[in-house]
Amino acid sequence: MFIRKTSDRFKKAVVWIVAAAFVLSTGIIGIYALVDRRSGGVPSAMASDIASVNGRGIDYWSFIENFYAVYQQYPYFSPGESQYWLRSYVLDQMIARELLRAEAERSSIKVDEAVVNETIDGYKALFSDSDEFRDYLMSRGMTEADLRRSVRSSLMIEAYVEKLQEQAVVTEEEINAEFEARLTEDEDLVFDDVKDTIEGELLAKKRDELLIAHIEELRAAAKVEIFDPVINAINAAESGDFETAAKYYNEAVEAGSSDPYLHLALARVLEKLEDMDGALAAYEKAAEVDGGVTAEVHLQLGLAYNERGMTDLAVEAFRKASEIDGETDPYLHSILESEFEGLGLTEDAERERQIIDKISEETAKMYEEWLKQLEEAQQTAESDDSSEDAEETAEQSGEPSSGSEQSEEQ
């Protein structure tokens, strides 16, 4: 899917989904995502750090496992640049978790060992027997003692965050103001009906704000080093430091990366720096590295050519993008349709419209089929419920059910 820019609102929502997984949960993202591999047993070849927080390393292996655990839960992140954005935020949350862990330890928060045991037992219940559980832990490069330390640490962080968020308070004035604001959108709202909901939502928001502010304070006072050039490039670009971003992207691509999206990202940064020749070279390198596999890459190259008045090359890249995608992404084809129309290529534009219409028809058919299957499933469930109710009524009245009558006859 073609994704060029993610909205700030969407980003903030995802940040907190990811943050909840790392900071507040002991089970959402799987056993291995909780493991602090610095606590022992990591082969040296896997122990290189992607970052450090006050001298304590976050090793690359743990980072990769956490990233894929989160990525699998949120499949709306398409391959490419949005994955790199998610990688950056996953590392941010691992850093936040480490900062909170250190503060929780300093605050001398105690964790009930019975809760630790209950959590460990919950993990064990996911496996057929203790041998399978042990083998799984070994496959992750850890022991049950490692897991126990990580669970205890996570519970300690959770307790620390809960204590911090207890400071959040919502006043009656704030509830009334929020109700008045909502009343402008829905004049049928009744205060007593929505008061508790508004209070709960405002309280949750304040708790989040407290946690965000606290993490920002801890990070500002900490020594945080990130050793991954791509994540450093993303952070620099988002802060508006495009020269530093270009430096880090160049470092990543010079290391021999075969990912065309890194070249696309470099191209956009170079455009910000008004290095148009360098940017075009990066777009062309992206297409070369891609080897005609990814439609978005060739679309971006076509847009770059078109912006520079290189019409013939733009048309060639646009047609290549359409050919690669086939009949998959209606958004990509809508961009191509608009570009072809702008170039006066009516036949190409019409072809893109036909592809969009075909995708729409197929999507509508799939939706209708899904609705049909859902309706059939509901009817089956209702029929089963009716049969169970009838049998229960028959049993209570002492009458044989239809099923038991058939059995007697047989």
Image (cartoon, rainbow, N blue to C red):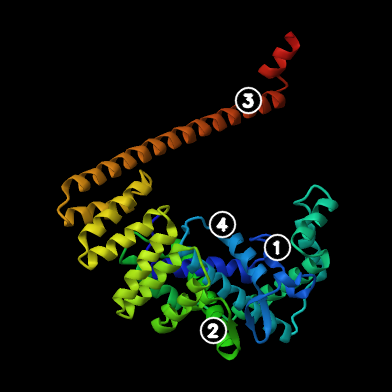
Task: Tell me the residue that label 2 is attached to.
Answer: 216
Q: Which residue is drawn at 71% across and 27% down?
A: 396
Whether residue 182 is situated above or below residue 402 in the rendered picture? below
Choose the circle earlier in sequence order: 4 or 3: 4
Identify which residue, 285 or 225, lies in the foreground.
285
Closer to the N terminus: mark 1 or mark 3? 1
Mark closer to the chain start, 4 or 1: 1
Q: Which of marks 1 and 2 is nearer the N terminus?
A: 1
Between disc 3 and disc 2, whose residue precedes? Answer: 2
**In the structure shown, which secondary structural element does the residue marked by tag 2 occupy?**
helix
Q: Say which of 129 and 346 sits in front.
A: 346
Q: In which quarter of the image is residue 134?
A: bottom right
Between disc 4 and disc 3, the foreground one is 4
In the image, taking residue 381 as reference, residue 158 lies left or right, namely right
Q: Residues within 10 Å of mark 4 (few under 14, many from 20)?
A: few
Q: Which mark is residue 389?
A: none
Q: What whole-number distance in Å separates the C-alpha atoms at marks 4 and 2?
A: 26 Å
Element on which disc 4 rests: helix
Badge 3 density bin: few <14, some 14–19, many ≥20, Cα 10 Å: some
Is residue 370 placed above or below 19 in the rendered structure?
A: above
Q: What residue type is labelled 2?
A: Glu
**Residue corresponding to mark 1:** 32
The residue carrying mark 4 is 73
Q: Report, in whole angstroms, how far the alpha carbon at label 4 lies from the one at label 1.
A: 15 Å
Give the total of numbered labels: 4
Whether residue 183 sits left or right of residue 167 in the image: it is left
Residue hosting label 3? 390
- Determine the CA span between mark 3 and mark 2: 61 Å
